[in-house]
Amino acid sequence: MYRTRTSDNWQKLPGGFDTVNARQFFPAANSYALPDLKLESGLSIPTWLVPYKSRIRNKEESAKGALHGYLDDYRLESLWSHPTRALPYLAQFGAVLTPDFSLYRDHPYPIWLWNTYRNRWLGAFWQSQGIRVIPSVSWSCEASYRFCFLGISQKSMVSISTIGIGRDKVALKLFSEGFRVMLEQLRPTTILCYGPLPDTLSHLANEQVGAEVVYYPTRWEGLRAARRQTEG
């Protein structure tokens, strides 16, 4: 066989060959082909949440918590672009929340759908690798309700974030409306909330579907609390 100086380069696929992870698909019971996440049975409520790429040295402690992806999108891109590379790191934790790729209300519909697909695909991929997964649920305006709750089992533990809605009246209104639809469609048993949740919504979750709401402070809340203790 004739060989050239570049022959070896054709023995394997280039690194950017499959940027959309089209070499592996997962079952989907919806017309948008959003992968279905399996219901995790016997999943304990995490004692704490830490952001992606945090280092936890104590393995026993890491098994009690969960890893979240409530970060700027660019910090999550490596999870999508190199899904197998992060597996040993993710496996340290008791559970991993699916990454919260943004659904900004001023973004076009295809971006909402694409980011929701990436959320579900990574969750399904991690489950296929034996990692326990908690779905992160997010929505935008009413148009996103067509797909943003698909692929998540009813009566499961889910996670949400309230980052960025406190001082934005429009964002708070859209979040509250979507929260009500989420309760109707998913009927979660437990809602992990990263950031403060308005009392009215917390009471609604408990009264409407009997869901327990578990609150986790954000990184900035922790920093502010530490500063207050120092100044005091």
Image (cartoon, rainbow, N blue to C red):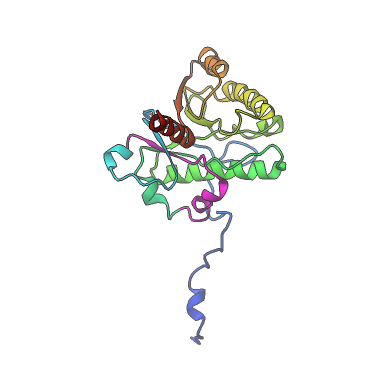
Q: Is residue 27 visible in this depiction of the protein?
A: no
Which residue lies at the image location 56% right of the left edge and 50% below the top edge? 74
Q: Is residue 84 above or below residue 222?
A: below
Residue located 43% across and 34% down the image: 227
Residue 30: % across, % down: 61, 36
In percent of width and height, residue 125 lies at: 47, 46
Q: Is residue 130 above or below residue 151?
A: below
Q: Which residues are magenta?
A: 63-83
Q: Nearer the viewer, residue 106 or 196?
A: 196
Q: Residue at point 28% right, 42% down?
A: 59
Residue at x 49% of width, y 50% of height: 79
> Toward the viewer: 108 or 217?
217
159 relative to 56 in the view: left or right: right
Looking at this rendering, what residue extends furthest in the front direction? Answer: 231
Query: Position of 92 compared to 193: left or right?
Result: left
The quadrant of the rendering that contains the C terminus is top left
Residue 91 is situated, as x and y percent measured from the top left of the image, at 36, 45
Residue 222 visible to the viewer: yes
Residue reaching furthest to the top: 207
- Residues 2 and 76: in front is 76
Give x and y (percent) for residue 68. Answer: 46, 39
Quarter occupied by residue 49:
top left
Q: Is residue 208 magenta?
A: no
Up the image or down, 78 lies above or below 3; here it is above
